[in-house]
Image: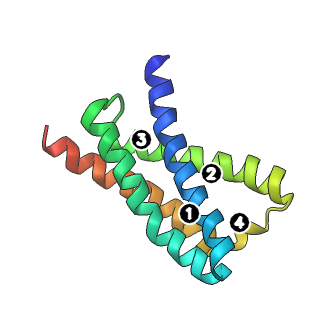
């Protein structure tokens, strides 16, 4: 159970930082600029989270961690953001706002995990 909690905490921290970037971005710049900044920040955020996770814990493989982080972000965006906050699934029609960041969450988590694993 402790391992699952550790993994989910890392996914949650990554999601929270990404949510903060997009939330602040919407407040201080245009929607398009906020989406671009968010898409640029996502792989950095999840790359750092992944690096810390694989350096200290490494309970699951890079593929598993990438799928968990992606699944967590999908779940939180669907339930909390789309259904509760926005009360609309419109956000899922944005490639730049949703699908590219999801892809980048997966790729950055996976490739950083693989890179860190090669060093151990």
Q: Which residue is mark 3?
A: 65
Label disc, if present, on residue 21 of the rendered structure: 1
In the picture, the quarter occupied by the C terminus is top left
Compute the Cα span from label 1 to label 2: 17 Å
Q: Which residue is mark 2?
A: 74
Q: Are marks 3 and 2 in contact (CB under 8 Å)?
A: no
Q: Residue at 67% x, 47% y: name it.
A: 76
- Give left or right: position of 24 versus 6: right
Q: Image quadrant of residue 24? A: bottom right
Q: Residue 1: x percent and y percent? A: 50, 16
Residue projecting furthest to the right: 87
Q: Is residue 76 above or below residue 56?
A: below
Q: Image quadrant of residue 28? A: bottom right
Compute the Cα span from label 3 to label 2: 14 Å
Q: Residue 47: x percent and y percent? A: 36, 54
Pointer 3 or 2: first along the chain: 3
Pointer 3 or 1: first along the chain: 1
Crowding at dot 4, Cα within 10 Å, few <14 / some 14-19 / many 20+, comes out as some
Q: Are marks 3 and 1 in contact (CB under 8 Å)?
A: no
Crowding at dot 2, Cα within 10 Å, few <14 / some 14-19 / many 20+, comes out as some
Q: Residue 79: x percent and y percent? A: 75, 47
Q: Secondary structure at mark 1?
A: helix
Q: Secondary structure at mark 4?
A: helix
Q: Residue at 51% x, 43% y: name it.
A: 13
Pointer 1 or 4: first along the chain: 1
């Amino acid at each position: 159970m402790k391992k699952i909690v550790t993994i989910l905490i890392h996914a949650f921290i990554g999601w929270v930082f990404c949510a903060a970037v997009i939330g602040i971005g919407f407040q201080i710049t245009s929607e398009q600029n906020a989406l671009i900044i968010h898409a640029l920040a996502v792989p950095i955020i999840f790359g750092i989270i992944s690096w810390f996770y694989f350096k200290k814990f490494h309970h699951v493989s890079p593929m598993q961690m990438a799928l968990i982080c992606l699944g967590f972000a999908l779940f939180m965006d669907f339930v909390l953001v789309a259904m509760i906050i926005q009360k609309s699934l419109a956000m899922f029609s944005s490639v730049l706002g949703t699908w590219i960041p999801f892809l980048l969450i997966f790729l950055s988590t996976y490739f950083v995990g693989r890179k860190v694993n090669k060093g151990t």
